[in-house]
Image (cartoon, rainbow, N blue to C red):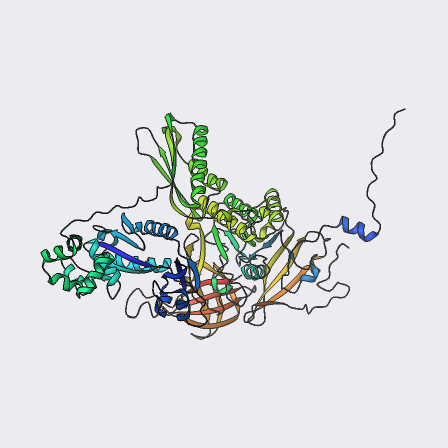
Amino acid sequence: MKRRLARGSAGADRPVLLTREVAGRELIASCCARSLDAGVRTGMDLAHARSLMPAGASPHIEPHRPDRQQEALVALSKRLLRLSPLVQPDPPDGVFIDFTGTEFVHRGETRIIRSAARGLRKLGVHARLGIASTFACAWGLARFAPRSPAVAREGEEKAALAPLPVAALHLDEATTFAFREVGITRVEHLLALRRSSLVARFGPEILERLDKAFGIIPERLTPIDPPAPLHASLLFEGPSDQWASLEAAARQVLTELVSHLATRERGVRSLLIELRRPDAKPEMRTVTLSRASRNEKHLWSLVRSQLERVDLSKGVEGVVLRARRTARLRHEQLASPALGGSAEQAAQAAWGELIDTLIDRLGADNVVRIEAVESHLPEHAHRERSVLEQPGSRATVTAADRPARLFPQPEPAEAMALVPDGPVLSLTWRRRRWRVVACAGPERLSAEWWRWPDQGRQAVPPDRDYYALQLETGLWVWACRQLKTRRWFVHGEWC
Amino acid sequence: MVGFQSESPKPCFSSLSELRAACLPARPARVLPTGLGLDQDLPHAGLAFGKVHEWLGVLEPDETPGGKRWSPPLTLLTHLVRGALERADNAQARVLWITRRGAASLTPFPASFAGEGARDALACSIFVYAPLPEQRLWAIDLALRSRAATAVVADGTGLDLAATRRLQLAAEASGAICLLARPPWEHAALSASATRWLIRSAVSPSHSRRWTVSLLRCKGTQPAPEATRLWTLERDHATRTFALVPDVRERSGEAAPGTRQRWG
């Protein structure tokens, strides 16, 4: 299945107009979606276009630079490589993507279309999508179909192209004009004519286009090359079990990788260290960073701590460092405050390095944020989330009177009161009996009704009545009584 | 005869106040007012940033000296952390809590963080769990030296003089405030911290929580009798503030609580 999209210029806060100078006049070369809605068309005079703009919207006017448009198109095509390895830019403003066979990776054709549309929207590109079994058909659908995305199933190309104007066949201007003179405006009119008369009248190209559109003549794609992955390596002449040689080799490889990153203005987020072993599979280690970085000192400290855990007795034949995940990191971000960089960036960089070093030594599960969760039950009221992940949606933290600390396990206790549901007089807890000086409560906490709508299930946590008890030493504890089993527990304390 | 050049004369002070200013320790760059109502007795009217302050925890009910269970004074620590975040000078203020899991963990219940304030203390906090004391010491040192954290709250059980001195130097270099929670049986341990406090529960006649806070050690002041360094604090849950409870007992000849002898 091929796909083609026609790209308008990116939507921004202000309408954008690109102009071209022709014989002393400034004509519109292309415009953004907002201007299209206002009625601006290609080839219009600039003054006319400005008059059509709504009052108050000052348009951004720039001369049209075809070379920069071509560069932007190639960059966009490289980003679309995530959908399929076969991508070809189609100047001036389109991209061909061949995603035959990738349906099982993306789990279905509709998902591919949806993720492509979403991704392009996020990039700020106003795109129209056409999907068909041939490129020529997709080209026409993307440009001229009434709605985007326009999909033509296998074998339905004729039906899909028929209602479209003749220009959907990617003909040159002279032929289109000739067609219009004769009264052939839509492709279905063209299909109604005999093939021999078409050749005689308008030349052989029209037949070639039709055959390509319906899949009779094959089309070829020249895909762009994907960007080369970032890696650097050093292979030894023979195995070595010396730490000094491994350290020196790794340092040299890291320096090389950092220079590659610097030329591409990227920072690494996930680094793969591969140690080649003689007569064995290479050993892989991964270093993950919380922020993209190409600070050689910081990367070296993380790589070195990984290398220290390697068993050198089996020998190492080479070191390869691959940057698995990278992110854009402009040069300005590395400026130190002494050189005029902002303190904010220095603080962010210092924070990222601190987190990375802590995670490297203690593990990602032990450096966490705590998030509040929508739940009454105190043991479910919060959840840990690793610092590397994005913070989730925040629940409101209840302002009720809750203890400063919750015990890891509720501790069993026994309480005595004068009347069954009355104030508690004494508490037996931790093998000692305490006199209760003050008692506040009860507060009933039951299971979250939205989690277990059917109340008859066994897994529902039982209701509890919570009391705040002041013991004779002045310590306040949070004790609860399970209603079903009538057992008491001490759950937390105000310390 | 050999001539010699005399050295340049030592600088002299033109007044007594200049001499005093040269001898006294410098004022800290930033100070955290404790908000507990006892700032007038601290040398700089609050806890200095860039220093280590120790908070010895509440004794557990069945505590025997040498036992293993203690409760860190989390209510006070979260109150101080909220104050420190309000006084942070950079836009992205962060607090690190370095502790271990399980019993005697410093993880406060999230509801105790709720309350008014410009910065959401829970969102600015990162919790680091390190099971071994050496790992905790390393993590506190790293966090203080990195200049990325505004405040570091840590479990300082078993830290000796060398360790606390190392942390003190790291805190001075970065300007972050370090609050160490220690078990109450370590009150006699040598340490390089600037202040050391002991918190105990106190019986309260009403439903508000009460603690007695005593200042065991404060650098830059002379030791004073214990009665003058003991305060009773009461916490109002609704406003989440602390208030001093005045001492009702009046003993003749004793200094009223709250007055201390100070240099200068």
Is the residue A457 above or below the residue A390 in the image?
below
Q: Is residue A375 visible?
A: no
Is the residue B25 above or below the residue B5 in the image?
below
Report the front residue among A356 and A139.
Answer: A139
Given the current orientation, which residue lies at the most extreme right position? Answer: B1
Is the residue B64 above or below the residue A376 in the image?
above
Location of the N terminus of chain B (image quadrant): top right
Q: Looking at the rendering, which quadrant does residue A249 occupy?
A: top left
Report the front residue among A359 and A78.
Answer: A78
- Locate residue B45 relative to residue B234 in the image: left or right: right
- Locate residue A311 relative to residue A471 in the image: left or right: left
Report the front residue among A108 and A312.
Answer: A108
Report the front residue among A284 and B126.
Answer: A284
- Locate residue B144 relative to residue A463 in the image: left or right: right
Q: How many marks are shown on the rendered structure?
A: 0
Is the residue A89 above or below the residue A374 in the image?
above
Name the spot of residue A394 as percent of width and height, x first.
43, 64
Name the spot of residue B58 as percent of width and height, x first.
56, 58
Location of the C terminus of chain B (image quadrant): bottom right
Given the current orientation, which residue lies at the most extreme front position? Answer: A23
Q: Is residue A240 visible?
A: yes
Name the spot of residue A262 as percent of width and height, x first.
45, 42
